[in-house]
Image (tube, helix red, strand yellow):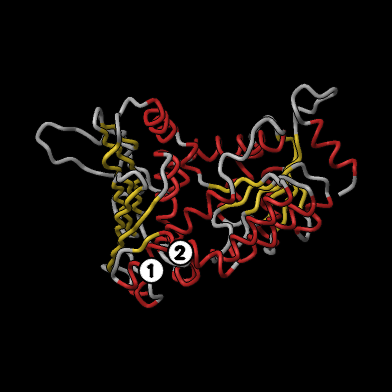
Amino acid sequence: MGPEHHRRIRLNRPGAEGARRSMRMGILGLGRIGAFHARTLSGLDTVDSLVVTDPVAAATALATERWGATAVDSPEAVFAAGVDGVVIAAATDVHPELILAAVEAGVPAFCEKPVARGIGEGVAVLRAVEDSGAHVHIGFNRRFDAGCMAARRAVVSGELGPLHTVRSTTLDPAPPPAAYVAVSGGIFRDCAVHDFDIVRWVTGREVAEVYATGGNRGAEYIREAGDVDTASALLTLDDGTIAVVSNSRHNARGYDVRLELHGMTDSIAVGLEDRLPLRSVEPGVTFLAGPPHDFFMDRFADAYRAELTAFTEVVAGTRTSPCTVADAIEASRIAEACALSLHEHRPVRLEEVRHEGMRTA
């Protein structure tokens, strides 16, 4: 990118003479989540245009028709279009090269998790990002959920007292397609990783040790891929707090995401609202009052909007990344430790995974 591009980035910052209130955003990948991000970005006051690319022509045509995006034929062409920031929503395998391409182009990047398929490759990306001073925001939308943010404030303020137990739950209404399961890396890496990140973020603590178990009660193709469709992980945090993470691919009633924090003074819950897909059988209780959440884009629509709004602030230079590459890699390390624990039927200290990642980077 030439000097004109970098001048444009600076002018997006509040207080700059002739400051731009709008910016041009690039999107790399227009699958389910990429198209969702395109729609969200097109509705932000701070975004005036989109430049998109995807190998599927129908996807770019749809983005052009619905959101007035400019379609180009490659990620390189997106960067060449002078975008102020770029959203990476392509396949996991290309996350590392696209993050590094954004770093090389001097363009702030938002990338969906994970940073990379393996810890070693992720650590290599982290080193490159840190050496360059680039702005990279990794997508963990629960950090922008109103309930999770309130829970973090409660922990930080001390109103709960010292924590002793945390429970984080993610139950999908139905398993993903067989093609996705075959390359996802498993339930801990593609599903529970959101629980691991939110436990770290809300408590402000690191995970010291994990013990994980799992089983198969449904789709046979999940077993055939070497994965489980229901799993639990017991996390011991570095201050002795116990966190229990529960996940399943089968929750016919809907998409169930909850977080509980129990302290010595008080206890709180995230997700206990009228669309929680859980039916009470207590006499006289009418809960649930609304239609159950049926998909993550439904449950976290407001969080996704807040997350991308935060990224525009990163692009404008008014805030630092609210979820760094280092944060994302730490959540992935917990997932790796859980996968190892499941496979070897034993507790796993995080140091085992951390040292292995450093060796393979």
Within 10 Å of disc 1 (Cα), the crowding (few <14, some 14-19, many 20+) is some
Within 10 Å of disc 2 (Cα), the crowding (few <14, some 14-19, many 20+) is many
Query: How far apart are the two marked residues, 2 and 1, measured between alpha carbons?
Result: 9 Å
Task: For the residues labelled 2 and 1, say whether their Cβ atoms are less than 8 Å apart.
Answer: yes
Percent coordinates x, y for residue 173 in the rendering? 35, 54
Percent coordinates x, y for residue 77 in the rendering? 81, 56
Q: Is residue 340 above or below residue 164?
A: below
Q: Which residue is mark 1?
A: 340
Q: Earlier in the sequence, mark 2 or mark 1?
A: 1
Q: Is residue 108 above or below residue 97?
A: above
Label tally: 2
Frontmost residue, 184 versus 14: 14
Give SS at disc 1: helix
The three-letter code of the residue at mark 1 reads Leu
Numbered disc in front, either 2 or 1: 2
The three-letter code of the residue at mark 2 reads Val
Frontmost residue, 306 versus 268: 268
Q: Which residue is mark 2?
A: 353
